[in-house]
Image (cartoon, rainbow, N blue to C red):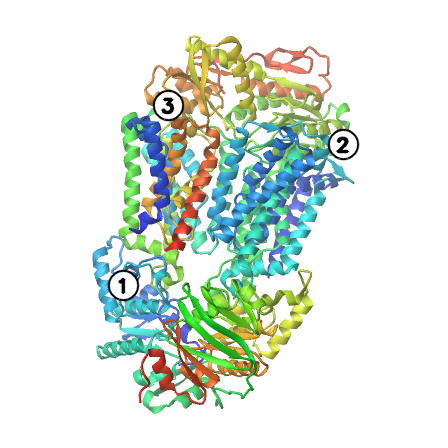
Amino acid sequence: MRPVRLALPALLALLALLAVLALLAPSFFAPDNLRDVVISNALVQIIAVGMTMVILTGQVDVAVGATAGVCAVLSATLAREGVPPVLAAMVATLAGGSIGLVSGVLVARLRLPSIVVTLALLVILRDGLRWATDGAWVGDLPVSFQWFGLGQGGGQTLLIGLTVAVIVAGAWFLRTTPLGRAVYATGSDAESAQLLGLRPDRVVMASFAACGLLTGLAAALNASRFAEVPGAITAGIEMKVIAAVVVGGTSITGGRGSIGGTVIGVALLGTIGTGLTFLGVSAYWERALQGAIILAAILYETVRRRRA
Amino acid sequence: MRNRHELALAIVVAAEVAVFAVVAPNFATGANAAEIVRLAVEVGLLALALTPVIVSGGIDLSCGALLGLSAITLGALWRDGGWPMPLAAAAALGVGLLGGALNAWLIAYRGLPALMVTLGSLSLFRGLAEGLTGAVDNYTGLPPSFLALGQGYLAGIPRQTPVLLLVAAGVAVLLHRATRGRAYYAIGWNAEAARHAGVKVANRLAELYLLSGLAAGLAAVIYVAHLGQAKADAGTGYELTAITAVVLGGAAITGGVGTIGGTILGLLAMVVLQNGLRLAALPAELAGILTGVLLMGALALGKAPGVRSPQSAVRSPQSELEMRNTQLAVLCGVILLGAGIVATSNWWLVRSLRPAALAPATTGATTPTARRVVIGMMPKAKGDPYFVSCRKGAEEAAAALGVDLIWDGPTELDPAKQNEVVEAWITRGIDVVAVSVENQAAISTVLRKARSRGIKVLTWDADSEPDARDFLVNQATPQGIGGTLADEAARLLGGAGEFAIVTASLSAANQNEWIKHIRARLASAHPKVTLAVIRPSDGDRDRAFAETQTILKVYPKVRVVMGIAAPAVPGIAEAVKQSGRTDVKVTGLSLPNMCKPYVHAGIISSIVLWNTGDLGYLTVVAGHALARGQLTRGATSIDAGRLGSIAIDKDQILLGKPFVFTRENIDDFDF
Amino acid sequence: MGENGAGKSTLVRILTGATSPDGGTVVIGGHTVERFAPLEARRLGVVAIHQHPALFPDLSVAENLALGAEPGGVFARVDWPARRARAREALARVGADIDVDRDASSLSLPEQQLVEMARALSVRARLLILDEPTASLTPREVDRLFDLLKDLRASGVAVIYISHRLEELPRLADRVTVLRDGRTVATEAMAAVDAPSLITLMVGREVASVFPKREVAIGVPVLEVEGLSSREAGVSDISLIVGRGEIVGLAGLVGAGRTELARVLFGLAARDSGSVRVAGREIHPRSPEQAIAAGIAYLPEDRRRHGVVLDLPVSSNLTLASLALVSRHGLLDRAAERATATRLVDALSVKTASLDTPVRQLSGGNQQKVALGRWLVRTPDLLILDEPTQGVDVGAKAEIHRLVGDLAARGMGVLLISSELLEVMGMSDRILVMRHGRLVAEFNRATSDAESVMAAAFGRAPAA
């Protein structure tokens, strides 16, 4: 199938990495560790599902990291003020969706290039949050904030369950709903999509809003893993997410790619760090290796295309 | 059409200058203009080279990372390789070219999308720089003749100005006068059509990425000379600033549109805004927010040529002109509104500070007692909770003593930004500068300059070179911190066993210094205690959490995990808590408030720190005394208000020993 | 019908809801259209096949056929097996044998056109609009299309058929409407008008001579090709000669390898064997830039994508291929550039507001003149014209024909690729016919007749 073929280089690299780990550090595959790796990557994974939709329409959203930071602080602040944590998480999710919608409207209605719009939004959100919190952490949270009061085991199950649900729902949405197919059509050729009555403007806005919603959800879920929430934005989440989507075979120009590929991309880039520690490799070369893998994956794709 | 955009930008810059000339002390001076230029050089070089890249429809996200790689090449070859400086500088340019060549090969000759390629090479270059230096090496102690290139003056203007002007002129000729420039525009609009017209598309693109790499190399040389240091994290995030300048300057990210004049104006609009806000002692975050708004405005203004919508051919030139006028009006309105907000929100501050600003800065030694003392206090990073807690004490002292406290600094660890802020304070003319130094070599020159202008200089938290300041407010030496941490680890391990460290970023200077002293202390006092592994957290709680989870599994014999960055310790504690490993203890350097729940739960055994609020308090007290002439060299103690009498050892004001917080005493502290 | 820029495509865009009208009413099936939106148009049963195939390159043929044709709704599901089955059926109707799982980007131009057609015909349309649908179809496919359209007409579907090919209309149309300058100038019963009167209506004036072929003495060979083969381009064993002042027509069906041959000569596709000499010198161009240096100029088939840079001004477009001639030491000489551009705009009588006007704002014919003009800054030895008058209105077409004649008279060799048989036959001194990547026949101007050329292109013996 085509989606698998697009993600092939990432899949091969992932399998190679897992094979090395299986040989040299089989303890990597302990259920506990796999669970922890999945949970650590849940934030990036959930956002990456939304990012896949945005990139499929031929756009990009570099403000997801800043959005996630703002949403996490929002959910924690609400919880501290006595709002039930689940409700706070929902509000944060909606807030993420609204931020995404703002980008979407600016991109689709005013026809501004998405990379610049979201770059500007990133700067505004990041510095605005820093101004508001002064970097102070949101503490003194009710006990029920962590794991939504479900306790560690229940919370972890909920987190993993929701992550899987988002992946499945995203894949199903893109594969079998008319709107999902319109996402591909828009990224492939927006003008033709317009002529077919697919409303590419709305598709682009919807995908940005979906990406924002998922970013808000991911941020709220991620915040619930801890007892406090940092008041600043974790730099570089957007780059991790975009890199994972692209390594997973989604074309940066839109129209081609799949959620399955994105899952493989997240798994690959998310496993490298932990895997290297298990192999006893120094952390210093981790980033260089990630860069090399990204370059190799996109290079492989053109070699394949040329041969075809 | 393009001129209209540049005109609008010129109006923006003029508006900024006009507003700040009124609200920001000493803004409209020649010296300040020179400093603005100096600050703009590195990013400016990247932005200039990036302009034709973006015009050709490409992008280079890797230029900041390549700057870092070139910088450490220069440092390593000079210090470790023993190369003469000119040769090492040439090698840095060479590395820039090589990095550019990699991008050029993949983009121009393999036809890969520039965004993806440079996203990958960004990781690769930064990763190589980290790997090659072990992320620890910081090359300093560069020869004065070399530093003069980045710190000295030539007929009153910064020495690097001519380099910037030359490059600007060169790129302007290349883009606007040379035949190649025409080819870049053609490629940016339609590469296939350009190829059919006989344009060597691949070669043209390749030379652009080579140029961008070369500019990164050149910027690296100037960066190193400017800051006196070369480290793996040099130039982090510069690519986004450079891209912002180019796009603000009217270039279309989709290619085909953009001018060097626009880029220079865009850069000016950003730098003047930052400098002006700094001089006006307004929050630096405002600069980011306003830049973001400006960028959106510029986009709306420049969108017609940037986006090729099918309708644009239909629209008549007349209506387009009218629309552009409306947009121009909207943009000007936004600018005026922004300027208005800046001016009004600043009003109270201006009124309170005006007398200070009007007093000649050179009369610091004979400051009249009638007016309020102005102290500029700088953390390493404003958002860091550690420094946020210092600020509380500083503000308390300022209120008690009637001092005007300006609290400003980099938003993220960045030695270049620290210099920028001190320069702004010198220009503004304040009484006392108090700095928590990120990098000695980088800041000492500027601090000496401040002293030569009669400004009193304190360092706190971390020291500069001794002759660059009057006093150090010393909370604890790296040796003391390292020793205490090592002792804590040994105590918790019962004198033997393995422990792990989760640090900030791998290239964080402070942490690396502490680790050095921890190792030394282990070797001398606790031979049976071994340090199993060091992992980075990037100052990110979540990453510290994940790293700890892995450490616990891979190194099952580790019984103590130590965090030496404030946000790392709670992350470690949460990971230990969730793992259910009750045999593992947590210690480290962090803030009591962040760790309280974990300390009470018995997961964190102890944390090591001094009272940060007191540190801020003492710094302001010392600064006030210095400005009033009550504190001079030779004093043996200082009366520090609620702290009582504080001892002074030569030029160091000693806060006291690091404090070990445990379950028993932690509730006595609130910071 | 109507000249380029007469407003036909704009009218289609309005009817399909892509553009909103300023005034007036449209009544479809007794229902006055109030909201002009693509979805509304589809709801009313208006379906269009546009001039340029508008398939989604990244999507499969099955999906391309399904998009917009399936019932929508947020909770609808995509049924993939049903999609594929419907796609095969739709393709069979237009007589195309295409794997429905292929990406549209891998289809050839005629294949794309067929898929486009299948898509339009698979929708239950009340009004079907076809905008130049036959540009890249073989006569056999055209026949099939016409049969289909007649069936549809019989079943009550109204058809608007836009074409530049005068000979097609009598076979199909009941009535003909001529547009000029965005207005309707006439609507007549098809039987009541003939080709010359239609041309008169479109242009508003008499066209004295469509093909002003000038007699030119043919000189020494300027292009000599021997045994040329290219696997990449799919041409093999091509040998031909073009003399100075000679116009050699290259006829054949779409996909016969004519454009591909031009691409090999121009260095856009790799050559495996054979030799090419231009003005007596052996050349091996591996890029357009080398081909240009050797004296070859190429006017590509797809003007908007390859012929001009739409968003650059007229002057930049004219000098783009000869920047060295308007510069000194690598720096542009603005005065020289303007002088050159002015000279060409005058010589080609390009209608433009100014030299700084983006080419996008020019009409198709004037865009094509600019595309041609860029090769006249210097004097190439060989001019390859690929469909030089496609999508160009009748007036500009005549001007381009006259211009080509002039250039040949000045001693250039011209290789003329055209799908319009009359154009090839009217313009050329000799006519070569290609089929399946090979040269299969040669005719002299004096001895050629349309039937023989067509027969050669189809690989049949000429009808007796």
Q: Mark 1: few, some, or many residues within 10 Å (few <14, many ≥20)?
A: some
Contact, CB < 8 Å: mark 2 with mark 1? Answer: no
Task: Kindly indicate the quadrant of the structure image that contains residue B443.
Answer: top right
Query: Disc 2 versus disc 1: distance between alpha carbons?
Result: 78 Å
Find the distance from the CA under tag 3 to the CA under tag 1: 57 Å
Where does residue C249 sit, x and y in percent of width and height? 46, 80
Q: Which mark is residue B554?
A: 3
Name the image quarter holding the C terminus of chain C. Answer: bottom left
| Labels 2 and 1 within one chain | no
Q: In the image as oriented, which residue stretches furthest toward the right?
A: B155
Q: Which chain is disc 1 placed on? A: C
**Gap in angstroms between the C-alphas marked 3 and 2:** 62 Å
Q: Which residue has dot 2 on it? A: B360
Compared to residue B349, the image places residue A181 above or below, namely: below
| Residue C367 appears left or right of B445 | left
Closer to the eye: label 3 or 2: 3
Q: Which residue is mark 1?
A: C69
Identify the element where label 3 is drawn. helix
**Tag 2 secondary structure:** loop
Q: Mark 3 belongs to which amino acid? A: Val
The answer to whether tags 3 and 1 share a subunit is no
- Asked whether B520 or C358 is in front, the reply is B520
Name the amino acid, label 2: Pro
Quarter of the figure with residue B357: top right
- Chain identity of mark 2: B
Residue B389, given in percent of the width and then of the height, sits at: 53, 23
Label located before the other in sequence (3 or 2):
2
Q: Amino acid at mark 1?
A: Ala
